[in-house]
Image (cartoon, grey):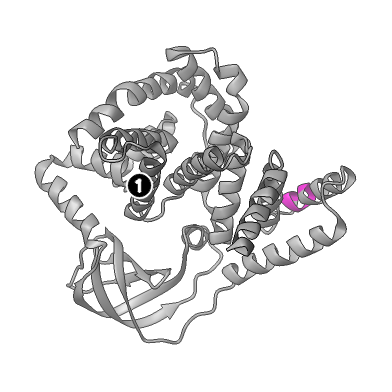
Amino acid sequence: MLQEFRIKYMMLTKIKSLSNTWHFYAILVALIGLSLISLWYTIVLIIYLIYLYRIKFINKEIIISSLYIIISLLFLSLYNVVSDKKEIAGVVISITKHDDYCSIVVLKGLRKVRVISGGNIIPQIGDRIKLEGSFKKLGFDSFSMYLKGNGIFSSFSASKLEVEGKSIFSFKGKIIEFYQSHLDEKAFTYFKSLILGINDFDIEYKEAINSIGISYLFCISGFHISMIALIFDKLLKKIFPLSYKRDYVVIILLFSYVILTNFSYGVLRAVLMYTLTKLNLYKRLGMSKLDICSFSFIIIVILNPMSLYSMSLRLSYIMVLMIILSEDLLKNKEGLTKSYLMALIAFLVTIPLVITINHEINLITLIISPIFLALFSFLILPITYIMI
């Protein structure tokens, strides 16, 4: 018992000693991963390592071991081996229907597999299915890298599909079925986007919200998670009068929500930051908001090194990082002024990524985005949750 206490004390002491330095490690991890994409990142990485070495933040041994471990993880994820199995079984966690086939994401153990099925049997979310077919290797094209960035490292072409039963994920399917029967088509599409993180808007609508720079409002973010946590906290107040017990229950519910949204990076980032904030408060770790943001980023990259190639992860962290760094600018601002400044910051820091996605920049975003942000924050999103 005494030995366990000593180990826990040493761990907490080590974490406290790293306070206000986690961002150095987060930047190092990001640059190592991104250096495999472009030579420019490699140059920046070398300059950054020289800087860390000069300020005596790290020594040569740490640099060499960190490079070896992280690059090994990245290459193991990048160069996946194709299995020769002809049968697989798993649980359906998402379905995208096309004209002549279905794209299904199957959870097989702790791994996600993309299944292409052209059969007549269309499973439901939460179904346990058995498949016959063959694996296909993912390449290095943009779509394959997108799949890997979302934790999908295998593609399976199914010639036969059998539904064997239901799983706990059927709960999500039941939620979708319930609201689909009670909402019209347009309202149901908004529900899936704002509550479940499923973006099923038609192409024209996607192009419209992308062109005016408000697509981020239709993705589940830290603001959504904060509101959900607040709602659960109020509902559980009578059942759990002690705040720390209530926080434990809320965190469990939030991680259940992460599963419900298929481990969306925006949701996972927000829930991790919420959990680390509470842990920091109760354990008095002395971590700043920047530390918490950086530590959550490192956790996600450890879970899936290929997440560095996910555009949603990059956008999510860039925006929250800039909001944290801009706190002094925003702390005395309120209402529309604060919304405008936040939208302006988001617009300026995401220009390189937005150009990569849309190949254009719409300056009207500077006028429209703050207005939509205020409407979503104070009207549309609260009403949506109340109605749900």
* Lateral position of residue 140 relative to residue 379, left or right: right
Q: How many marks?
A: 1
Q: Determine if residue 201 is in view.
A: no
Above or below, 198 relative to 143: above
* Lateral position of residue 84 relative to residue 314, left or right: left
Measured as percent of width and height from the top left, residue 217 is found at 39, 33
Q: Quadrant of the N terminus?
A: bottom right
Q: Quadrant of the C terminus?
A: top left
Which residue sits at x=29%, y=42%? 195
Numbered range of the magenta stretch: 40-44
Measured as percent of width and height from the top left, residue 205 is found at 31, 37
Between residues 259 and 20, which one lies in front from this camera angle? 20
Above or below, 136 relative to 260: below
Residue at the farthest front position: 2
Secondary structure mostly seen in magenta is helix
Which residue sits at x=51%, y=23%? 342
Magenta stretch encompasses residue 269:
no
Measured as percent of width and height from the top left, residue 329 is found at 60, 17
**SS class, disc 1:** helix
The residue at which mark 1 appears reads as 249
Measured as percent of width and height from the top left, residue 175 is found at 19, 51
Between residues 90 and 78, which one lies in front from this camera angle? 90
Instruction: Indicate the amino acid at tag 1.
Output: Val
Above or below, 265 relative to 3: above
* Lateral position of residue 11 relative to residue 196, left or right: right
Which residue sits at x=21%, y=57%? 171
Which residue sits at x=29%, y=47%? 200
